[in-house]
Image (spheres, rainbow, N blue to C red):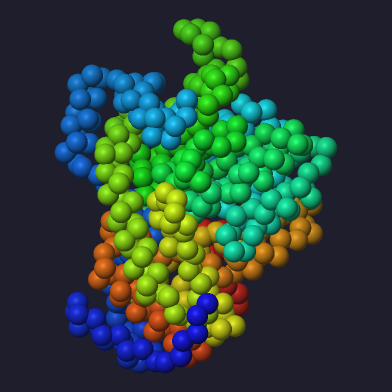
Amino acid sequence: MALVAQVSVMLNWCENQMVKNRVHDLAILGGEPAFSEKLYVGRPNIGNRERLLDRINQMLDNRWLSNAGPYVQEFEQRVADMIGVKHCIAMCNATIALEIAIRATGMKGEVIVPSFTFVATAHALQWQEISPVFCDIDPSTHLMDPQKIEELITPQTSGIIPVHLWGQPCNVEAIGEIARRRGLKIVYDAAHAFACSHKGEMIGTFGDAEVFSFHATKFFNTFEGGAVLTSDDDLANRIRLMKNFGFTGYDQVEYLGINGKMTEPAAAMGLTSLESIDDFVEVNRRNYKLYQEEFAELWGVRMLNYDESQRNNFQYIVLEIDEGATRISRDDLVQALSAENVMARRYFYPGCHRMEPYRSMERYRNIALPETELLASRVMSLPNGTVVGENEIRRICDLVRFVLANGPEVTAGIRKRMARAAPAVPGEAMAPGRN
Ligand code: T4K
């Protein structure tokens, strides 16, 4: 965190001549919102509409809407080629893809996962009555700490699900070595990491299998969608059968299966998104560089940096707010920004272990995850993608600076308003769980 004087910043924006030079100009304290429309984290990127609609029309003419149709097959082939794996099995979403990969790799008993992740990572295990064993993170990367994995292994441990959080690669070498030595399976949750690489190899090629998410909020989407990638022929075959009820032919079922299929419209969107993927990444990268420049010298704020020697999708703009230095909490900053229609998010507050069903379960009662707890209290994400440009980003950054420069006053103003609005209800202003 670089040092910079805590000076009062006057916001003087070209658009609408919006000026905020007193704290009471902030929308949370009664002023006008800086943006007339909400700026979301996770606004979908849309590729070439004409191409998408052509594909959808073709699909309607063909009357082939699901069940391994031509678009799904083409999409799977293109993704497998792009990543450099033998098999890509497209699915309806990444949560089901994780569940199927977990089952197909034979995980059971206990599986080690980070708590600092989207709750789907843990739920994919618990849904199958496999216990997630939460591992702490390395605070510099937010990724699961391999040294701590080893300490959590018991005779019941069958696997590890590390998460390439924010598109950053996990320490695949150290985790792979532990798994080999201790006879454990690895399925990487690569929900954030499509189009990212590690030491020149694409994410999607590591572990027994990797799972991408193509949800609407990801920089690359198929509306809803996901995929399992693997180069293991037997595993791929099991996964293909399991995502289609276990059918091996008409009227013939070989496995307990489920319905995890991707639909043709989703694959049509995926093929169209693939045609624009380089543009999406370039926009994210350009925005990321701008945020980086704007936040370079902001006392008490650390922005997560990506390793630019590797491929990255630069989707997530992640800040850590050190309240001791900024004199305003992350939660108050997020509230102040939301009132301005900058819908910053507290991904991944409060950590899975503090969500149900885990927080009420005996086995998680005395769990110690100090780095996860600290990070969950500090972290926030800002909007990125094709819906924000230079003007919006400079204004968002001006707002962040303005709020931070007036931290104690903003905090006091928020408390005063809260006390007036709800004098009898103590506690958090923001609901935990959804952040
Ligand atoms: N593993 C990890 C590490 C993950 O992050 C995720 C999903 C998964 C596994 C599971 O993947 P999927 O099964 O979903 O494929 C969102 C997404 O729903 C979720 O996919 C994603 N991670 C997570 C990080 O973010 P929420 O609860 O934040 O969604 P929501 O509805 O609040 O939307 C986020 C923002 O996006 C909103 O502020 C509005 C905007 N938005 C959303 C949608 C759906 C739009 O502007 N347009 C839209 O169509 O979970």
**Residue 26 percent across, percent down from the top left:** 36, 84
Query: In this view of the protein, which residue sits in the foreground, 310 or 142?
Result: 310
**Residue 325 percent across, percent down from the top left:** 56, 84
Say which residue appears at 46% left-offset and 90% top-offset.
5
Q: Is residue 213 left or right of residue 143?
A: left
Q: Is residue 310 left or right of residue 278?
A: right
**Residue 247 percent across, percent down from the top left:** 51, 14
Say which residue appears at 59% left-offset and 69% top-offset.
377
Say which residue appears at 31% left-offset and 21% top-offset.
70
Query: In this view of the protein, which residue sits in the foreground, 345 or 150?
Result: 150
Query: In the rendered image, which quarter is residue 145 located in?
Result: bottom right
Q: Is residue 354 left or right of residue 231?
A: right
Query: In this view of the protein, which residue sits in the foreground, 29 or 351?
Result: 351
- Viewer can see residue 122: no
Query: In the rendered image, which quarter is residue 110 located in?
Result: top right
The total number of labels drawn is 0
**Residue 384 percent across, percent down from the top left:** 35, 60
- Viewer can see residue 32: yes
Rendered position, 125 above or below 167? above
Query: In the rendered image, which quarter is residue 24 located in?
Result: bottom left
Say which residue appears at 47% left-offset and 29% top-offset.
85
